[in-house]
Image (spheres, grey):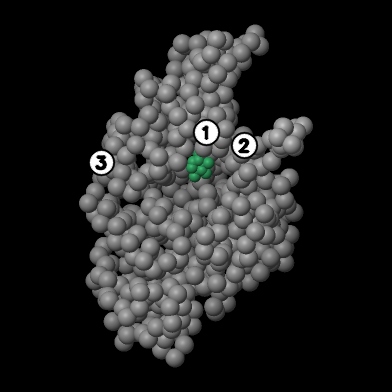
Amino acid sequence: MKKSADWWRQAAIYQIYPRSFKDSDGDGLGDIKGITSKVDYLKSLSLDAVWLSPFYPSALADGGYDVADYRNVDPRLGTLKDFDKMVKALHDADISVFVDIVPNHSSDQHAWFQEALKSPSGSKARDRYIFRDGRGKNGELPPSDEISHFAPSAWTRTKNPDGTPGQWYMHLFAPEQPDFNWDNREVQLDFLKTLRFWADRGVDGFRVDVAHALKKDFKRLHIAKKNMSGFEIVQNGTDILFDRNDVHEIYREWRKVFNEYDPPRVAVAEAYVQAKRRMLYARPDELGQAFNFDLLGADFDAAKFKKTITDNLRLAKSEGSSSTWVLDNHDRVRHATRYGLPKGTNLIQWLLSDGKSAKLDRKLGAARANAATMLLLSLPGCTYLYQGEELGLFEVEDIPQQDLQDPTWFRNVVPQMVKGKVSGLALIHTEKGRDGCRVPLPWESRKKSFGFGKEKSHLPQPEWFKDFAVDRQDGVKGSTLTLYRSALALRKQLQTSEELRWIATSSNQVLHFTRPNGWQCITNFNGKPYKLPKGEILLSSAPIVAGKLPANTTVWLKA
Ligand code: NOJ
């Protein structure tokens, strides 16, 4: 069925991390055919769309966000033909498809970067990336002090064909992810070609990776300082590297391409910038939508949720977009874990200690996670879900060091010191990274790799995963999967115009709002059992006891 032009405004979109979703050929990596084999499962979640993290050819220096060829499928994951079949199967199930576009950087294996390395300074091939001479007498110092998101420097020195040290190139992420020069028209045009390539294959939408970083001020690049966190960015669009005003020209050109299609293609910006500026990417003549990550770092706290909801609905409206809601993605500790740890737990330290530095209360985490999800699903706007949250998965906090893959782990290291001196070659890792939320999904509790593939999975699955497997939860009353299925199905019927009205409650721990059609949502964050008002109970994230809503629970009512 053809969708209307604004189908995305209040959609439920499920993120698939393809290498960890379902492995059809037993090589340990999830693949495209694996996704196709699970279309019925996706349909059972009443989703409007799925978004696929990168599945392109990649050396996997950053989980596929190092793309070697933007218009192809990694042969380990399948072929373009497999991709087309997957799109058809999803469309037949009325599920739209988003792909991930990674425009800030390519892989160092990309043909253009390889060509650039072989080409001289100042060449056309080098101009597609950001090559600069180093500072210092012999160019031995990086062109600026900028550090990479994965630490340490954002610059790597190249070797000339004769083996002598050469120019440096910029990479806001790993050295295997060289940044493109977005002032270069060839780069701009090539991405338009990529967008059309996927849109012509039936892709309905695009998630745009680090959308705020593409344009750089090359005149001031040499003075770029350690400027990693989005919060340090100058908020007026004149920062050297991030969220520059001129980045929007790119998306206005993309929008013209999206609008060549019927229905117009959809896009969502990943832009870690201040909420107000984030919405600039969501303007109707640009990407249309931007991720709101405000709840990713927030406690399960009534006041925080209320403020986040109010602010984001207002901001989205002011730019003509709809708000987005996100609790989980492939970059963050899963929300069932975040909510089950003592308030203030340092997640980086907790992961480094393999989960020993603070005690995880799984029961509490699960209850809060389900309550928060139900709250989000009843809000106006678009909810992005991440694979595995519908199973109530927790973060895998104790992946053995030798199995870790994330560049965050490999690159955040300091030398070991003994008596004030650097000791030998031993390095201390200071961040474990994001592998714990990327462990392959458990489908069948009794099978090897819990039904993910045949024998192995590319990241090890813990034994406790079997209790969360789909076959353990399918049709089981009270399971997280059953709750997600019921909530998503109901939401599809109940979703209404994009308004919300708060209703006063007698407790500051309880949030209550109604939508224009009488659909009400009440969440008791942390208070005493809360007496429910009159109304038909549609669904609750945990049992209602004697007409009262327990703490850490959400209920949907119809007035
Ligand atoms: C954001 C992606 O979500 C993350 O996984 C990736 O490492 C960086 N962008 C770099 O592409």
Image quarter where the C terminus lies is bottom left
Image quarter where the N terminus lies is bottom left
Real-space Cα separation, disc 1 to disc 2, in angstroms: 10 Å
Q: Are marks 2 and 3 in contact (CB under 8 Å)?
A: no
* Disc on the earlier residue, 2 or 3: 3
Report whether 64 appears left or right of 292. Answer: right
Q: Residues within 10 Å of mark 3 (few under 14, many from 20)?
A: some
| Pick the front one: 145 or 38 | 145
* Disc on the earlier residue, 3 or 1: 1
Report whether 19 appears left or right of 516. Answer: right
> Is label 3 or label 1 in front?
1
Real-space Cα separation, disc 3 to disc 1, in angstroms: 31 Å
Q: Which residue is mark 1?
A: 148
Real-space Cα separation, disc 2 to disc 3, in angstroms: 38 Å
| Pick the front one: 504 or 488 | 504
Q: Which residue is mark 3?
A: 285
- Residue drawn at (36%, 55%), measured in percent from left and top? 324
Report whether 507 appears left or right of 107. Answer: left
* Disc on the earlier residue, 1 or 2: 1
> Is label 2 or label 3 in front?
2
- Residue drawn at (63%, 10%), measured in percent from left and top? 164
Query: Residue type at mark 3?
Result: Asp
Q: Residue furthest right?
A: 424
Q: Which residue is mark 2?
A: 411
Above-or-below relation of 208 to 303: above
Give residue 181's quadrant in the image. top left
- Residue drawn at (31%, 31%), measured in percent from left and top? 238
Query: Residue type at mark 1?
Result: Ser
Query: Residue type at mark 2?
Result: Arg
Q: Position of residue 438 (x, y in %)?
A: 59, 52
Which secondary structure, mark 2? Answer: helix
